Amino acid sequence: MRSSPALVLLVLLATSGTGLAQVPAADEAFQRGREALKVGKYDEACAAFEESQRLDPQLNTQFNIALCDEQLGKLASALAIWKELAAKDDNASRRAKASDMIVQLEARVARLRIDTPVPPGLEVTVNGARATSYKDMPIDLGTSKIEARAPGYLVWVGTVTAKDEKQQAVVTITLDPDPATTAQAVVTPVPPPAPREQPPRSLRKTLGVVGIIGGGAAIAGGFTFGLLARGTWQDAKDVCGGTICDTRADLDRGNALADSARTRGTIATVLAIGGGALLAGGIVLWMTAPKSERSVAIAPSASPSSVGLAVLGTF
């Protein structure tokens, strides 16, 4: 252990801010830590400050924990706290002190080099915390527990002791294969995915042709019914001269013709929509058939009495 001549000054500096614990239990623990720190009872001081930090986390409390850790030889732990405070503490005095302490401890802290193979998934911990570096990791004075884990290997556990400041400690990790994992590792060939079932190419072509013909016929039928509906509607209007019917018989006949026109119009709409969908599906099937199977051709066809598509080729 080493004591600092400026320890009392540091304690006063640490308590001069506005970050004192507000929770009563945390504040009581903080005060106990201050008293213990002033008289050199560093173990008691650290325990009290850590309790206060657990109850009510404060940067001011972290400052005092760093002071305790340094006195107990936990230079790496103190260094980590000083770096955190230097990065985020809003108190200018504490931040300046943290920067000074970083420079001092970087020159004093013991360091650890870890020699190890690096299989996939390797994780090395030092005293339960994941190793931040394998080449130059700061460690506290005393004995540190090292663990290494990797899939397919036995857990490696060892220790390393840093007795002096500035010491370069070295630990060599040897990973042995896990017999249980090796015995259970059975390579099972993965079968290739089953090919997606598709309609036979000849069937695809046939269905496409049927869809084109059927769709074209439905559209032509819709066009025909549309013309009939239009003519019937005009007949219904002509019965009464397009305005008012003279007799009851004319009214009934006009209504009958109007109903017939509506029915034919509905049929025309259904045939046109259904035919369009069927035609589109047929074209898709025909277009996706291999070129060698496309033995049909589609051409527009029109005459004075009809309009549609002509399908030419062999089936």
Image (cartoon, rainbow, N blue to C red):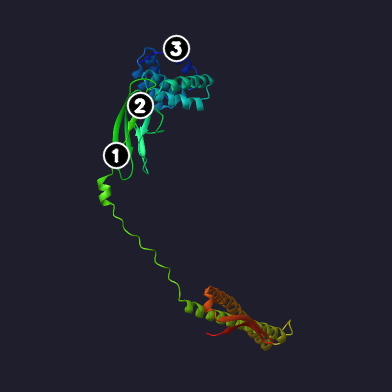
Asked if disc 2 and disc 1 are in contact, CB closer than 8 Å, the reply is no
Which image quarter is the N terminus in? top left
First in residue order: circle 3 vs circle 2: 3
Q: Secondary structure at mark 1?
A: loop
Please tell me whether mark 1 or mark 3 is closer to you in this view: 1
Mark 1 Cα-neighbour bin, 10 Å: few <14, some 14–19, many ≥20:
some
- Front residue of 214/4: it is 4
For residue 245, the mark is none
Q: Label 2 sits on what residue type?
A: Ala
Check disc 2 and report the residue beneath it: 169
User: Which image quadrant is residue 111 in?
Assistant: top left
For residue 6, the mark is 3
Asked if disc 3 and disc 2 are in contact, CB closer than 8 Å, the reply is no
User: Which image quadrant is residue 25 in?
Assistant: top left
Please tell me whether mark 3 or mark 2 is closer to you in this view: 2
Q: Secondary structure at mark 3?
A: loop
Point 48% across, 79% down: residue: 202
User: Which image quadrant is residue 53 in?
Assistant: top left
Q: Label 3 sits on what residue type?
A: Ala
Marks 1/3: CA–CA distance = 45 Å
